[in-house]
Each structure stands twice: as C-alpha cells, then as structure tokens.
Image (cartoon, rainbow, N blue to C red):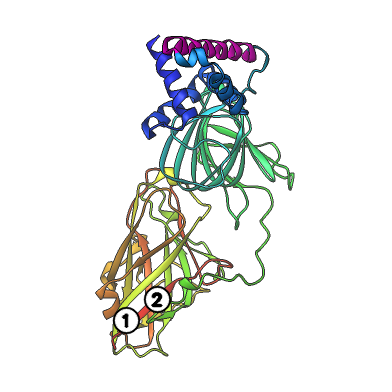
Amino acid sequence: MKQDAEIEDLIQKEIDGTLTQAEADKLEHLIKNNPDIRQQLSQSLWLHGQLSADPDKINACLETTPDVARNNITYLVFKSFLALAAAVLLVWIGSFLQPTPLSKAVATLVKAENCTWGASELPTKPNSPLPPGQLELLSGIAVISFTNGAELVMEAPSNVELLSDMRLKLISGSVVLDIPEPAVGFTVETKNGKVIDYGTRFGVSLTEFSKPRVWVFKGEVEVQDDFTQKNKGQRLFEGQSISFGEMPEKLSGEVELNKQFYERSGWQTLEPLKDNYLRHGNYPIDANSPLLMVKYSSLAKNNNRITYISFDLSKTDLTHLQKAEFVLELQPSGFGFASEIPDCDFTVYGVLNDDFDQWDESQLSPLNAPGYNPELLRLNKEQLLVLGNFSINRGVSSGSVSIQTDKLANYLKLDKNCIASLLIERDSDELGKQGLVHAFASKEHPNAAPPRLFLKFSE
C-alpha cells in the first residue's frame, strides 16, 4: 500500500510538473519495467486532459455552491466526492479505452561504454528494454542482450536495426555476436546477404569502402551472398573470414571540407607529399588507398601495419618556427573489432637518416620500408627519433588526434633535405587475434581531411 501511494504521488507530480530529477528517473524506471504502472500513468494523463479541457465549468461548479463554500467541512466533503467521482470515471474509462501496448521487448541494453548515440528510435540508457527498432552508435561500445541469451556488441560508428530476438540488420559499422544454444540460427542481414549462426562467436563489418566481411572467432556460420550467389550457403569455421556482397560505389565529386581543418589564424598548413601504410608480410598496398592503417598484434604479427607520411618543406622557411602540430583524422577501417583491444597508445617517429625520406609510396614493402626491421616485424627504434605520443580510447573511430611537441618543431627545423618523414606505430597489443585495425584519412580520402602539419612562427 505504501508503494501504491508513492506511485500515485509520482504520477500526480508528473501531471503537476513538479517532479525532481531523481523522482523523474525513478518514475521512468517504473513505467519501463512495469506495464501496470505504465497503464496507470497513461490513464491518469488522459483523464487529466479531459478534466482540464474546460476548467471554467469545473470552477463554476465549485463557485456556484455557496452553502458548500461557506462550510469548510462540507467543502472538503464535496472535493472528496469530486475526487471519488473522478476515480470512478477513471476506472470506467480504463475498462473501455486501454492504452496502445508498447511493442514487446526483444532485448535489453545492458552496457554502454563511453557511448554517444545518433538518431536512434530506441532507448539508449543502460538496462532499457528494447523492442524492434533502429540504434545508431556514434562513439563507444554498447552491449545488448537478447531475450534468448544472444549477446550483441555494437562498435562505433555503427547502425543496426533489431528485427526480432533472432534477426538483426546491419546497416553500417561493426558488430560482434556471441550466440548460445537457445539462439542457434540467429541471423545478421546486410544489404547484399546474410550470416546465419550455428552456435558460435562471430563478427560482421561493413564500411563505405569495403564489402561486408565476416570473421568467425569460434564455432560455425553460414554465409549467404544474395549479390553474387557465389558464396550462397558457404560454411565458415573458427579462424576463417570472407567478404561477400557488392563493393560500395566510389564517392565522386568534390566535397567541401570545414575550413577549420585547414585554416588557423597565424598558422601555416602543410599537406602530405606522399603517404601510405606498410603491412607485414608480402601484401601489396594501393598507394591511392583512402585510409592509412595502424595495428600491432603479438598474436597475429602478419596483420600488423605501420603508417608512413612525408611532407615537403622546400617552400617553407623554418628559421623562426615556434610551434608545430601534426594532426590525423580518425576513420573506421572495417578490419577487426574494438571489443578485442584495450585503450591504445601510439608513437610518432621521425627518421634520422635523410636517405630514408626517398621511399616510394607505390612500392612500399617490408623489404624497402625506412626504419623497419623485417626480422622483428616492428620499427627499428635506433634509426628513429620519438616525436610524440597520442592515445585513442576503445570504441572511438572519429575525430582528430594530434601531437604538438618541442621535439617535433626541432625535428622540422633541423631537417636538411626539405622532406620530413613521420612514422606512426601502435604500441598497445590486442586482446584477441581479430583486434581492431586503426585507420586515418589519407590524402586520397574523398571526404575527410588528410594528415596535416600546422606551423606557427615567431613574430
């Protein structure tokens, strides 16, 4: 009875608009988890609206009862009678006008790690029940538990639609699913095909520059390729991966970028002379790739990547250089998963040997990459100078990262051949073999800012 009175009090305060933030949060939790309270609130709001539709009549009724008005006791009885009549009316209305029931929840949002949400149709607070609908995650990592025990990890940026407790549509981004026995048959749909689970843990990724791709961490899945029909019904097992579907159309036309990427009052901006990335092993890399990739894994060393960027300093007098900042724009890579890595640290190096500046972006390989040790599958630190460090939190794949250090400014000032080469390596290892590949926009990216050097000179 005490709880019923408390609920009635919260509902009345909601109607009066006098809820505190704590009371509002409590009422929200109650109506989300108790359909009876949700119905009670809905009916109360309806009745309030009806009784408030013509307040002059109600006031007139009270004003034109002089005997009641002159007798406080009688007046209170009269008010009680009105309240009782309203309650009877509420019950009568409720028996005929049931509020439209909410869609049945198919899942629950159980965790939101550093999350920023976009245009989502569903609740985005932890512990919120989720009916079918769309969720857009801009940054962070979110964990969703379906009613059948299946677990979905959304990794930003990603956009999904929950179709049922057995079906999910991946619109864009990366997801990881852990499927228990009661949910075998769980299906992830994409524009060009679907992935059907047979009791496993797997990931699916889709970006603007790549086909949908599936990785099997454990167990077995079936890939149905509706676009080419070549892989229809193909089974994949632990450790296997495959791309399927249609390659996205290349973006064309010029894109007007925000001037803040290029213009800073009192600063000069330089864009790369050349840029590319090295992948360990004999993997040819397209010099026109829109992405510069970086990865370190002691578990799968052939997947490691290092980025190389060179700037032309020949047209810049660096004698009075005061400050220098090196800036990169984060982009989704479409390779690996953020849930398989920790927060990551990176180091930016400069080469000490001027001959190293002559690398060819179209021929970069483990055999000729400057400052690279093919035996260690890592950079040779003795040939390089540390210029600065930056970090990227898990689940972040957009925004800018940068270094601004005295070491960077001095490195540029002391350059002798008018070319400055910067190398980026990830220091942090990953938690599993399919850890995320970090990526940055290259000078060929169609709609994101390329790497930049901002230079500030003394007066």
As drawn, the label of residue 238 is none
373 lies above or below 63: below
Callout 2 touching callout 1 (CB < 8 Å): yes
Disc 1 is placed on an element classified as helix
262 lies above or below 109: below
> Reading the chain from its start, which is encountered first: label 2 or label 1?
1
* First to last magenta residue range: 71-94
Disc 2 is placed on an element classified as strand
As drawn, the label of residue 453 is 2
In the foreground, 215 or 372: 215
How far is the residue under mark 2 from the one under mark 1?
10 Å
Q: Position of residue 4 (x, y in %)?
A: 43, 13
Give the quadrant of the C terminus: bottom left
Reading the image, the residue beneath label 1 is 412
Asked which quadrant contains residue 95, the reply is top right
438 lies above or below 86: below
